[in-house]
Structure formats: C-alpha cells, structure tokens
C-alpha cells in the first residue's frame, strides 16, 4: 500500500534545484538550516518516515493526508547553541483534524533531541527529530 505524503513549507523552500557554487553568498544564504525527520507510527509500524529541510524560523508541515500531521519550527540557535523548537502533532479522526498536542523545548540541534507523543486511546505515535544541518568541511579541512 502506497501512502501519499504531503509536505508544505510555509515560506519559500524550493532551494535544492540549482547546484551550489563555492563562495556564492546568495546560494549559501538560501541553503537549509535544519532537517526534520518524522516517524508516523500506527500499531508500532511506520506509516511514513519523511525527512524534510527548512530554514530557522520557518514553519514546516508534514503529514500523511487525512491521518497524521506535524507542524514544526526551530528558531536560530542562541549564544549557548540552544534553539527554541516547537512541534504541533494532530490526528485526523471523525472527519476532522483534532486539536494538536503542542510541545516545545530549548534544544541543541547538533545533538539528538526529539519530541515523542503517543495519542491517548489510539494506536498512533509521533516521533519528531529536528537536527541542525552542519555544512560539510572543505577537502583541505579534514
């Protein structure tokens, strides 16, 4: 069974279509800051496990249509490398999206933080893993 997965970035996130040129400030400015991996689980089995990228401060929506939805956002890190990060997790039941479970944290996104939520009275579970994108080192820096 193939599940249709819908991903919407609120803002502009069509940025991987052109190759990056070393030292190109415009290209560097458009590169994503953060990746979100989401596990949509039912009965402990994955319905979908997408990973999408976005910019700090940008809301990103990831969903399995008419079943499960996550809206996530991470702010740019502060001086201690902590990013304020929020996740809104919703389930589609009885013909409508139910009120979301909202979770937030101050997290170091270069580590392995996650939001995990099992929906009471159901067999659905969300796991949301935000990660900072760390640029690759230049060949001479290895």
Image (cartoon, grey):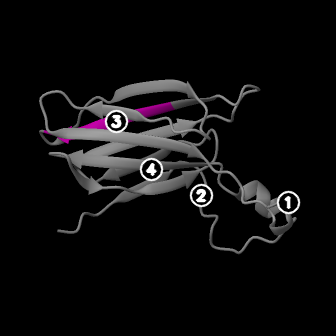
Q: Say whether marks 1 and 3 touch (CB < 8 Å).
A: no
**Which mark is first along the chain, 4 or 3?**
4
Q: Which residues are magenta?
A: 86-93
Badge 3 is on which residue? 89
Name the chief secondary structure element in magenta: strand
Picture coordinates of residue 73, whole percent (x, y):
53, 38
**Which mark is first along the chain, 3 or 1?**
1
Badge 4 is on which residue? 37
Picture coordinates of residue 12, whole percent (x, y):
61, 55
Whole-Å distance between the Cαs marked 1 and 2?
17 Å
Give the number of the disc on residue 25.
1
The answer to whether residue 16 is left or right of residue 72 is: right
**Which mark is first along the chain, 1 or 4?**
1
* Secondary structure under the numbered disc 1 in the rendered image: helix
Question: Residue at left 25%, top 53%?
Answer: 46
Quadrant of image for the C terminus = bottom right
Categorize mark 3 by other alpha carbons within 10 Å: few (<14), some (14-19), many (20+).
Answer: many
Badge 2 is on which residue? 13
Reply yes or no: does residue 132 show up in magenta.
Answer: no
Whole-Å distance between the Cαs marked 3 and 4?
14 Å
* Secondary structure under the numbered disc 4 in the rendered image: strand
Q: Say whether marks 3 and 2 touch (CB < 8 Å).
A: no
Closer mark to the observer between disc 1 and disc 2: 1
**Which mark is first along the chain, 2 or 3?**
2
């Amino acid at each position: 069974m193939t599940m249709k997965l819908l991903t919407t970035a609120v803002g502009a996130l069509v940025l991987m279509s052109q190759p990056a040129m070393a030292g190109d400030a415009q290209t560097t400015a458009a590169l994503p800051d953060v990746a979100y991996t989401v596990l949509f689980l039912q009965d402990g089995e994955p319905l979908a496990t997408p990973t999408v990228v976005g910019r700090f401060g940008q809301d990103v929506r990831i969903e399995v249509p008419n079943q499960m939805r996550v809206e996530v956002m991470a702010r740019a890190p502060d001086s201690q490398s902590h990013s304020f990060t929020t996740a809104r997790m919703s389930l589609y039941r009885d013909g409508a999206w139910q009120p979301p479970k909202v979770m937030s944290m101050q997290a170091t996104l270069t580590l392995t933080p996650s939001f995990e939520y099992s929906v009471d009275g159901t067999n659905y579970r969300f796991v949301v893993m935000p990660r900072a994108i760390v640029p690759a080192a230049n060949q001479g820096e290895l």
